[in-house]
Amino acid sequence: MKKFKTEQEDFWAGDFGVEYINRNQGKELLAANLKFFSKALKSASGLRSCIEFGANIGMNARALQLLYPSLDIQGIEINSQAADQLSVVLGEDHVHRTSILEFQPDRKWDLVLIKGVLIHIAPDSLTEVYDKLVASSERYVLVAEYYNPVPVAISYRGHENRLFKRDFAGEIMSRYPQLQLIDYGFAYHLDPSFPQDDITWFLMEKTADF
């Protein structure tokens, strides 16, 4: 297997990333994602294209396809087995089989999505990812992650340095003041109908080209 720049990338490209696939799929998750995106994107308009950073097997993409049947969706995925399944959802030519840190955008998309991925990025690499998210966006950036007002590291399924909470969206907007927060919200793991994993989401819009 290819050796990546950070231990977090190696972790997700390997066996743990494959195990994650089995835990995060199914009709219930698809239904929850439909509810999630219908709420998180209600203030967005004119969406024609989207790229998801860390798309896994396409559970988010499948929900977006149902909500926006004409949406042109691409995905970046580091784990080869997940990318194989993602290619079935999006088509092989819409899958970038690479690390987010190695991805180089050659165009812009109306919507850039990252959901439950920044929490697993090496903290020293976050600003590089922030720059790629913004550089890839024509108009909107949707960040959906675990939130904490200050950076903290949390043990993740018995592994250290694999999960981090912080104010990701706040850091992005501080770095790029031309981004305007237009909506935000929270999805609770005990929602009786459509649970998500305690995700706080932030929809930001570019107010100027930069």
Image (cartoon, rainbow, N blue to C red):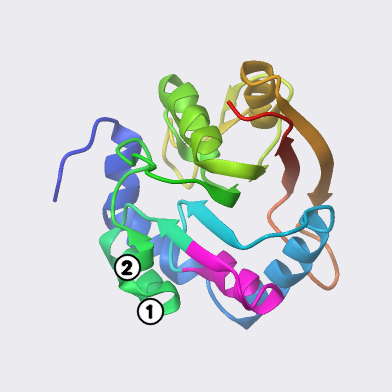
Left or right placement of residue 51 versus residue 91 in this view:
right
The residue that disc 1 covers is 88
Disc 1 on helix, strand or loop?
helix
Say whether residue 126 is magenta: no
Residue at 61% from the left image edge and 17% from the top image edge:
175
Q: Position of residue 90 (x, y in %)?
A: 43, 73
Over which residues does the magenta segment extend? 58-73
Q: Is residue 207 above or below residue 192?
A: above
Q: Examine the image and state in which quarter residue 180 appears.
A: top right
- Where residue 124 appears, as percent x and y from the top left, is 42, 19
The dot on residue 30 is none
Residue placed under numbered mark 2 in the picture: 93
Is 159 left, or right, of 114 in this rendering?
left
How far apart in space, not on screen, are marks 2 and 1 (Cα)? 11 Å
* Residue 24 visible: no
Closer-to-camera residue (149/102): 102
Residue found farthest to the left = 1
